[in-house]
Amino acid sequence: VGFVAIDNLRGAFEATDFLIKHGHKDIAHLCGDLRVQCAQERLEGYKAALKKDNIEIRKYYIKKTKFARAQVREALEDLFSLNEPPTAIFSASDDMAEEIIAFAREKSIAIPEKLSIIGFDDNPHCTYDNFALTTVRQPLAKMAYTAVEILKDLVNKKNQPIRKIVLTPELIIRDTVSSI
């Protein structure tokens, strides 16, 4: 089966590497549902960036949330009860990142001064706040256009080769990351 996808591993790697370049070493990752390929790839990208800079992968900084906001809240309670809570969080989705922002506000954790956050998706609603979310953009319009073109080719020509297209994500730098 053909498909159009995003390079989730690369996007997660670039997001985590961006945090590392800003001096962060205590970086947590809120995973999505690890039964889903994109969540697995984002976790692997996070780990690869840490390995590149010889930063220990601490299992207690990796929280599985299945993309659910209630689970994000539980994960954050765990992370911020640690003796060394994270200074940065890479979230597997912008919706989860919104929950991180809400939690930080409730706990009076200054963003980005005390906690840097990066999401994934570039949902438009993540720019309508006091500060806009730094995130990994998925080129959704390009993905949809490419998928429709593949479908049209399949409909018009019976014996088409299977096309597997992986598009490059883009790190969108906004207001939620600072250097430490």
Image: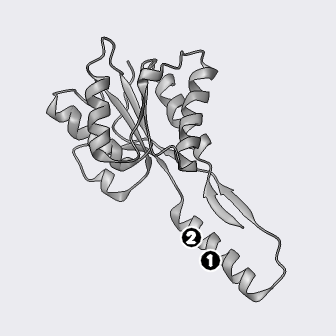
Q: Amino acid at mark 2?
A: Ala
Instruction: Please identify the residue farthest to the top as the structure is shown.
Output: 83
Q: Quadrant of the C terminus?
A: top left
Q: Amino acid at mark 1?
A: Val
Q: How is the image coloured?
A: one colour
Percent of width and height locating residue 35 = 53, 47
State which quadrant residue 51 falls in. top right
Can residue 40 be seen here?
yes
User: At numbered mark 1, what does the secondary structure look like: helix, strand or loop?
Assistant: helix
Residue 99 at what x, y percent from top left?
27, 42
**Residue 14 placement (x, y as % from top left):** 56, 36
Q: Which residue is mark 1?
A: 148
Residue 62: quadrant of the picture? top left
Quadrant of image for the N terminus: bottom right
Q: Are marks 1 and 2 in contact (CB under 8 Å)?
A: yes
Q: Nearer the viewer, residue 179 or 123?
A: 123
Instruction: Identify the residue at horizontal 57%, vertical 28% (top origin).
Output: 47
Q: Residue furthest bottom?
A: 156
> What's the CA distance linking mark 1 and mark 2?
6 Å
Q: Which residue is mark 2?
A: 144
Q: Which residue is rendered at x = 61% and y = 29% of the image?
A: 48
Vertical order, 130 against 19 (above or below):
below
- Relative to 142, say whether 35 is above or below: above
Label 2: element kind: helix
Q: Is residue 140 left or right of residue 165?
A: left
Closest to the observer, 90 or 136: 90
Looking at the image, is 77 positioned above or below residue 93?
above
